Image: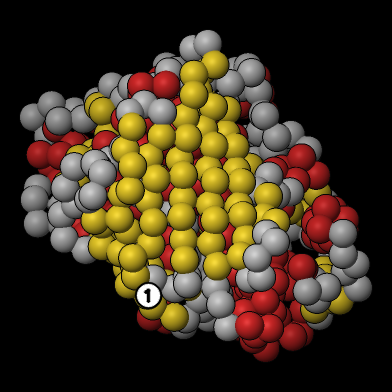
Amino acid sequence: MKVLVVGATGFVGRALVLRLKRDGHEISAWVRERQRAESRLGSEVMLRGPHSSLTDAVAEADAVVNLAGEPILPRRWSAARRRALRASRVDLTDQIVRALADAPRRPRVFVSSSAVGYYGDRGEETLDEASGPGRGFLAELCVAWEAAAESAEQLGVRVVRIRTGVVLGHGGGMLAGILPLFRAGLGGRLGDGNQWLSWVQLDDLVELVTTALTDERWHGAFNACAPEPVTNDEFTRVLAAELGRRAFTRVPRAALRLALGDAASALVSSQRALPRRALALGFRFRFARLAEAIRDVVASTVEIRPLSRPRRYELVATSHLAAPLDEVFAFFSRAENLGVMTPSELEFRIQGHPGDMQAGARIDYRIRLGALPFRWRTRIERHEPPACFIDTQERGPYRSWWHEHAFRADGRTTVMEDHVFYSIGFGWLGRLVHRLFVARALRRIFAYRGAAMRLRFGLSP
């Protein structure tokens, strides 16, 4: 299937593209900034826009997915911000539907984002897809957003409206913003903590969207949230427990409103939504319980240990992928795919056009570590398909960096192992920086890499 994705460079969009490529779909992405998109989406996605015709892009697709939308938080909802939120959702969806109307050949299905904010602040009420809309800015925004998408039905296109809960996953979403606070023991409930939170793990969300694209029975609104919503108080306790921390802090509603104005309502509104339609059609959530979803993000599978020589360390990460060795190695051997496996926060950009991956090749790229930008030059020391390749840092933030990517077949699956030996120097200060920042960042980066590869290739049993 040829799938056009709008919003492909975002937190959910990047994950969806990887999942769709696993099934062999041909993906194109409508983007605003091509260089940024190339870095985030890699060599397997055809980029369209911003100066080409959206109608032409739609006409070439069998399906369209719209995941675009400016972040609801953390900025205040000024009049200008409200207009921007509406433009990135309602106006853009209107634009897509106009392109559908003008296309000489129309896609069969249009999957469009919405949110459980559609239901407004509903307290203890249990909500499903038959529940009516609520009141307030977010509810009204979602109603207009869905109405814009629903108008495509008049064109003979099957429309699926995905009402997404809070998304939990590697590299973005709610957890990216609050994990540092909780790890520091500063996490806590918001308001009285009694408001209900409807959540969904990222892998389950993209699986749900993938199913909506291919299953003709999916039509209309679907709640994209796990079958067990929790209160904010329970969410706080589970997250703190998984991190081995305590969470005594409480942020009063008045303080949230003082900081965020009307936008604070997004944090304290209560939606106890259930995915009844998806369950009725046989969809199974891999992460149905909150503790499992949080553990998948926070439990590190990346090992870092100090070596006998001071300020030198070894990192080891292993993935078991449900794809043949040649396919996995071919993906990793494309320098253009480095950004696909890198969290957005690093702002990874390849400088120029990398040549073939071979011994002696050099790749220049730019990254950001926190507030500090760095230029990094990698040299490929060895390239031995399909067993391994080794790269070293010629220029970058580390005193030394040696990274072996090793691959071996295990039946029809592939075991991928990363071995990194690195040093950072600067004596006792370097050891402190490593403990407080570097080790945590590397665990986060390689955990994201593992999660991305799980989406792209699947995990072997």
Residue for point 69% across, 79% down: 432
The location of residue 396, given as percent across then percent down, is: 39, 71
Local packing at callout 1 (Cα closer than 10 Å; few below 14, some 14-19, many 20+) is some
Question: Mark 1: which amino acid?
Answer: Phe
Can residue 180 be seen here? The reply is: yes
Which corner quadrant holds the N terminus?
top left
Viewer-closest of 103 and 435: 435
Viewer-closest of 61 and 424: 424
Which corner quadrant holds the C terminus?
top right
Residue for point 37% across, 75% down: 374
Viewer-closest of 208 and 219: 208
Q: Which residue is mark 1?
A: 374
Q: Quadrant of residue 57?
A: top left
Quick check: 3 left or right of 124?
left
Outermost residue to the top = 411
Q: Quadrant of residue 439?
A: bottom right
